[in-house]
Amino acid sequence: MRALVCLAALLLPAAAIAAQPRNTLDIYVVDVEGGNGTLFVTPAGESVLIDTGNIGDLASKRDAGRIMDAVHDAGLTQIDHLILTHYHGDHFGGMAELAKQIPIREFIDHGPNMQPGNGADFYANVYPQLYAKGKHTVAKAGDRIALKGGVDWRIVASNGQVINPLPGAGAANPECASFQPIANNIEDPLSVASYITFGRFRTAHLGDLTRNMEFKLMCPTTRLPPVDLLLGMHHGQDSSNSPVMDHALRPLVGIMNNGTRKGGEPFTMISIHTSPGFEDLWQMHFSLLSGQEYTQPGMFIANLTDAPEAVMPIAPMKAPVPGTPGLQPAPVHNGKAYWIKVSAQYDGTFTVTNQRNGFSKTYTPR
């Protein structure tokens, strides 16, 4: 009889799994090979997906499949809200393929694409056909995504505009005096950025906001209060992750959506690790741009590659310039991929788990 009960539980459909009581805000940071795909599931079973991975026939199917693995693990039957942070191929690439596999109820973006290239083609020819099947919302700074279960979701930047200071913000930011701007493309600064609270737990996903937008948000006084968990981090690239943001947000933990030759650059690693009270950085991949000098222990790194380096160099490799003649593509793995999962309690306690090796660590809010 006991065996039959266990078998019946294993055969529960996804709808029945989703109906089971939840008491945590769950976050799946999906490996989309240096792109972005981050799935939130509220205690009420509602879902918010930020971005959908990479462009390209193989990559889009691969990344949509990896997101669907997380969807199935969470017992979801639809995506309630999909935030497209901006129109770069490593953020919208899997959307059309994903929409074939699961209903998407609302599409949220910053408005029209502003940068020539594949984003312009997607915005004009593909995206309207997708959001025509659901609700389309152009996000403005200050907007909320209506969610149940005690989750408050604020849009804190969109299309280059930023929110008024949130409660708990407004502190003078000493890092502003030594801020170093950097050149950026057109779309990154327009990213839809989110600040999420669940009881005492606070997290932020800022899309690919660049240093200049970080300055706009956090100087001379902060518009965002500190967080427990900082997500995304623009893949760990040095065009973002300035101390004006990292040190003012004071995260306990960061999760970086980097690739093997994308992100994890020394500027970022130094900035985050010198943030007051910072404890651990979790990464989607090891990064050759970190080298052994700045890399994390393997227990904090979710994925390997099909063709890893025989020896991890000590010195960081210089970031390759896109379009360089003879540049070898970054090694990727097209088989089993692993996510990093966060389960946050209402009291602010949260646990981060590396699916690849089962290593987990629980953090208590300050």
Image (cartoon, grey):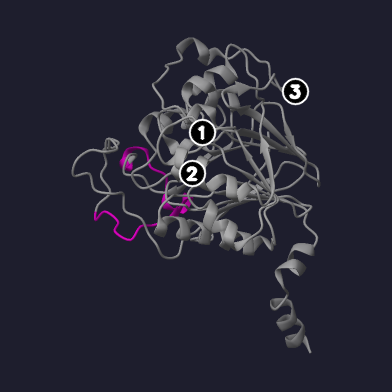
**Residue bearing mark 1:** 113
**Which numbered disc covers residue 122?**
2
Q: Is residue 275 left or right of residue 13?
A: left
Q: Is residue 305 magenta?
A: yes
Find the distance from the CA under tag 3 to the CA under tag 2.
37 Å
Q: Which residues are magenta?
A: 291-310
Q: Which percent across, then down, holds residue 286?
A: 38, 48
Which-is-in-front pick, marks 3 and 1? 1
**Which numbered disc covers residue 244?**
none
Task: Determine crowd level at label 3: few under 14, some 14-19, many 20+ residues with C-alpha closer than 10 A.
Answer: few
Work out whether residue 87 or residue 257 is closer to the camera in this orientation and state it. Answer: 87
The quadrant in which residue 69 appears is: bottom right
* Mark toward the start of the polypeptide (2 vs 1): 1
Whether residue 23 appears in this view of the structure is yes
Query: Mark 2–mark 1 contact, CB under 8 Å?
Result: yes
Whether residue 257 appears in this view of the structure is no
Image quadrant holding the C terminus, namely top right
Q: Is residue 267 magenta?
A: no
The secondary element bearing badge 2 is classed as helix
Amino acid at pointer 2: Phe
